[in-house]
Image (spheres, grey):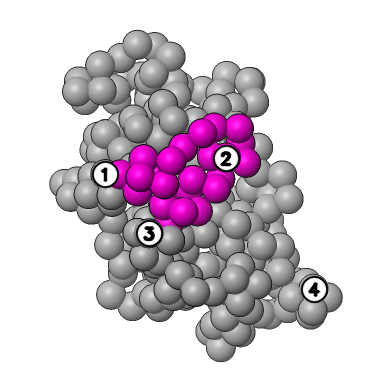
Amino acid sequence: MVALDGPSGTGKTTVARRLAERLGAGYLDTGAMYRVITLAVLRAGVDLADPEAVAATALDTVFTIGTSPQRPEIELAGEDVALEIRGPEVNFAVSPVSAVPAVRELLVTRQRALIEEVLTAVGGIVVEGRDIGTVVAPDAPLKVYLTASAEVRAARRSAQDTAAGRDTSHADALASVDRRDRLDSSRATSPLRPAEDAVPVDTSELTIDEVITALGELAGRRGLLTGRTAGAAEAAR
């Protein structure tokens, strides 16, 4: 198992999916789980400042999430919401929703169950988020903490929004990144921070391919390229 943590804009999702493909492993985007709960909260008109109401909505929310790196579907009550959960409304609200302890407890339990299912079925998994190495899977054999400068992350976020048809200025993207960092790092429950034994990787000046190569080498040194994952990694070269 590879636990991949870090703030927004560091390339976690792209890196995690491609690394999982290279290793022949499953993939889990825990951030998407918080985002789908956030979307449910927004659709229900729940006050973000009411943690009990947010927690109750989370408990009643029915969603599914895929664990294939090729097709990581996310559905809310049977509706494909993969694009909607990346929109500006969810971007703004996901940190306060994620800070509710009952929401985190609910989703961490589900995340651990999914990890065990995939490990049993596939033999390996790459899990991305903000508390994987510290809370969800503290015993993961490889923990990586991706970083990048705020300026670089804002540029990436602005480019992503443009590609998705949303007009976001660099200044607005930078303000969003700074706000998300502040909220995620200061929350009382499971704050964003690297695990003590996580390997830091600064992606500011690296291409995606360079990051994948570096993490693949780390996985090999940790003995994670064995069995099915070794064959898939060799075939991907």
The residue stretch that appears in magenta: 153-175
Circle 2: element type: helix
Which quadrant would the C terminus be assigned to in this image? bottom right
Query: Do residues under tags 3 and 2 come within 8 Å of each other at their CB atoms?
Result: no
Label disc, if present, on residue 179 of the rendered structure: 1
Residue at the spot of label 2: 162
Label located before the other in sequence (1 or 2): 2
Which quadrant would the N terminus be assigned to in this image? bottom right
- CA neighbours of label 4 inside 10 A, class few (<14), some (14 to 19), many (20+): few
Mark 3–mark 2 distance (CA, rounded to whole Å): 17 Å
Residue at the spot of label 4: 236
Mark 3–mark 1 distance (CA, rounded to whole Å): 13 Å
Residue type (three-letter) at the residue carrying disc 1: Arg
Foreground mark, 4 or 3? 3
Mark 1–mark 2 distance (CA, rounded to whole Å): 20 Å
Foreground mark, 4 or 2? 2
Q: Quadrant of residue 109?
A: top left
Residue at the spot of label 3: 151
Label located before the other in sequence (4 or 1): 1
Residue type (three-letter) at the residue carrying disc 4: Ala
Q: Residue 160: x and y, percent?
A: 56, 45
Residue type (three-letter) at the residue carrying disc 3: Glu
Label located before the other in sequence (4 or 3): 3
Name of the residue lying farthest toward the bottom: 221
Q: Residue 178: x and y, percent?
A: 28, 49
Judge whether residue 158 is colored magenta. yes
Of 163 and 200, the residue lying toward us? 163
Looking at the image, residue 136 lies above or below residue 170: below
Looking at the image, residue 75 lies above or below residue 143: above
Looking at the image, residue 198 lies above or below residue 102: below
